[in-house]
Amino acid sequence: MRKYFITGLLILVPLAITLWVLNLIIGTMDQSLLLLPPRWRPEALFGFHIPGIGTILTLLIIFFTGLAARNFIGNQVVRVWEGILIRIPVVNSIYSSVKQVSDTLFSSTGNAFRKALLVQYPRQGSWTIAFLTGVPGGDVKNHLVGDYISIYVPTTPNPTSGFFLMIPRADAIELDMNVDEALKYIVSMGVVSPESLQKKRAAVPNQSRT
C-alpha cells in the first residue's frame, strides 16, 4: 500500500508542479490582453476566455520590439526613450539598475551565469555550487587585495533566492557542466546528477575495455 502511494506521488507531484508553473507563467503573460481594446479581447469576440492567447501576444510584442530596435530608426527611438527615462529622478535609478542587470544576464557577450563553480560555503570544508556573475567593481575593488570574483550562491530547492559573495578567484573551482545542468543538480538537492558527468562515467569502462 505504501509503495503504491509513493509511486503515485513520484508521478503526480512533478506533473502538478510543472502544470502550476506553466499556469503561473501563462496567466502572467495573458495580462498583455489588457493592452487591447475591450471589444478586441477573446471574451468579447468568442464569449469566453482562451488561455494562452495573451502569451502569444506577449511573444509577438517581444519579437517585433526586438525586430524594430535592430534597424536604424528603431534604435534611435530606443535612444530617445531611454534619454527621457534617465531624466526622471526616481525612474532613472530603477531603470538604470534593471537595464544593467538585464544587459549582463541576457546579452550574448555577457559572462554572468555562464559558468558553474564549486566553492566552499558557508564554511571551510562545506562545498556548494555557485555561478560566476562578474568581478567586483566601483570602490569595492579598491578594498580587496588580490584577484576576486563575484558569485551567486543559490538556495535549494528555490534557486531564485540566494547569496551574493565576493571571493578570491583561487578559491573557486570551475565545473565542467553548463548552467542548466547545475540548476537541475541544485533544485533536485543533488538527486539528479549532471548528464555530462553521467556520460563521462559511462565512457570510462568502455575505454578501459579497449
Image (cartoon, rainbow, N blue to C red):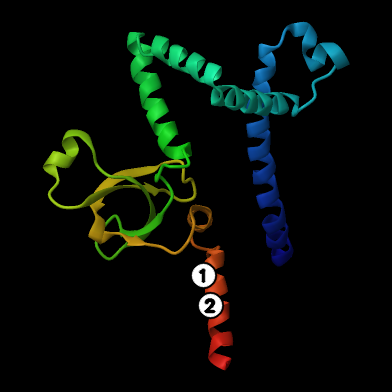
Label 1 element class: helix
Observer-nearest of 164 and 67 = 67
Label 2 element class: helix
Residue 61, image x and y in percent?
64, 23
Pointer 2 residue: 201
Position of residue 58 relative to residue 182, above or below, is: above
What residue type is disc 2 on?
Arg
Pointer 1 residue: 197
Residue 17, image x and y in percent?
64, 45
Residue at the far bottom: name it: 209
Using residue 51 as the reference point, say whether residue 126 is left or right of it: left
Observer-nearest of 58 and 49 = 58
Using residue 149 as the reference point, say whether residue 142 is left or right of it: left
Residue 98, image x and y in percent?
41, 26
Position of residue 22 relative to residue 29, above or below, is: below
Using residue 164 as the reference point, say whether residue 17 is left or right of it: right
Position of residue 196 relative to residue 48, above or below, is: below
**Quadrant of the rendered structure where residue 79 is?**
top left
What residue type is disc 1 on?
Leu
Q: Quadrant of the C terminus?
A: bottom right
CA–CA distance in space, label 1 to label 2: 6 Å
The residue carrying pointer 1 sits among few (fewer than 14), some (14 to 19) or many (20 or more) residues within 10 Å by Cα, namely few
Residue at left offset 15%, top offset 52%: 146
Disc 1 to disc 2: CB gap under 8 Å: yes
**Quadrant of the rendered structure where residue 171 is?**
bottom left
Observer-nearest of 192 and 195 = 195
Q: Quadrant of the N terminus?
A: bottom right
Residue at left offset 41%, top offset 27%: 99
Residue at the far right: name it: 46
